[in-house]
Image (cartoon, coloured by chain):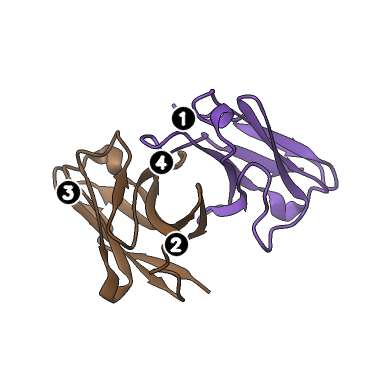
């Protein structure tokens, strides 16, 4: 059982917007502004999409955005494209001893 | 650009020690701005942080694996390594090395599958 809770799957049609939630506790998501999101295409390594709750690395499309409220974080993908179909994982800093915890992952299907 | 490549045996017997190496190319290995983690993913499952090391040699391990994990660095070869002892089938996974920056992992190796089986 993962420390952070994500929906197993979400879906959307091309052009639509979707949001993936990531629920933790005050010891991780709620306690720090260090939530990151990773995209993993089948058979590939994860790719950093969002860090520090809402920052995008260079080269990541501005269709990807992150936010946080209390103990829950969210990843929003706008203008959904077929290439966005992948698994998405959230990750949060959880203090110096635990360091980071991951969510169980969400499979995004583009209809 | 920075690239990471894992190497090591793809098959390990139960109770033995899993050993993997990550070679870093393209710069940044000696920078104190970064740290170098190992992360694994069992088949069909999520990600788990194993531990990380700084270029200086300081290490930090996942408490759940700490008793079995050793991460070391070879600065002359731009490599860092993972040893996981007393492996069981539960340690079967794709093992990734990555680059840590802040509290995120911004560059990943392609991953290497390690199966624990007799």
For the question of whether residue B95 can be seen, the reply is no
Q: Nearer the viewer, residue B116 or B52?
A: B52
Image coords of residue A72 (percent x, y): 63, 27
**Same chain, marks 4 and 3?**
yes
**Same chain, marks 4 and 2?**
yes
Q: Which chain is purple?
A: A
**Same chain, marks 2 and 1?**
no
Q: Which residue is mark 4?
A: B48
Q: Nearer the viewer, residue B110 or B54?
A: B54
Quadrant of res A60? bottom right
Image coords of residue A18 (percent x, y): 76, 38
| Left/right of residue B43 with respect to residue B21 in the rendered view | right
Mark 2 vs mark 3: give the one in front. Answer: 2
Q: Which residue is mark 1?
A: A2
Q: Chain of mark 1?
A: A
Q: Which residue is mark 2?
A: B109
Say which label, 4 or 3, has the lower sequence index: 3
Residue positioned most to the left? B15
Say which label, 2 or 3, has the lower sequence index: 3
Residue positioned most to the right? A15
* Mark 4–mark 3 distance (CA, rounded to whole Å): 21 Å
């Amino acid at each position: 059982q993962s420390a952070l809770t994500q929906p197993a799957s979400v879906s959307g049609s091309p052009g639509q917007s979707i949001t993936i939630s990531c629920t933790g506790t005050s010891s991780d998501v709620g306690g720090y502004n260090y939530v990151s999101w990773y995209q993993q295409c089948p058979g590939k390594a994860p790719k950093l999409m969002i860090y520090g709750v809402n920052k995008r690395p260079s080269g990541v499309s501005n269709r990807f955005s992150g936010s946080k409220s209390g103990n829950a974080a969210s990843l929003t993908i706008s203008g959904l494209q077929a290439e966005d179909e992948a698994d998405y994982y959230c990750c949060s800093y959880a203090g110096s001893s635990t360091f980071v915890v991951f969510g169980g992952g969400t499979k995004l299907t583009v209809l | 650009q920075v690239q990471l490549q894992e190497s090591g045996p793809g098959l390990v017997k139960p109770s033995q020690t899993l050993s993997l190496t990550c070679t870093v190319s393209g710069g940044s290995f000696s920078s104190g701005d970064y740290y170098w983690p190992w992360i694994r993913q069992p088949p069909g499952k999520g990600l788990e942080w194993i531990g990380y090391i700084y270029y200086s040699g300081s290490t930090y391990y996942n408490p759940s694996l700490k008793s079995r994990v050793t991460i070391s660095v070879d600065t002359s070869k731009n490599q860092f390594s993972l040893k996981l002892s007393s492996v069981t089938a539960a340690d079967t996974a794709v093992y990734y090395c990555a680059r840590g920056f802040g509290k995120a992992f911004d560059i990943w190796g392609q991953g290497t599958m390690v199966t624990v089986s007799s």
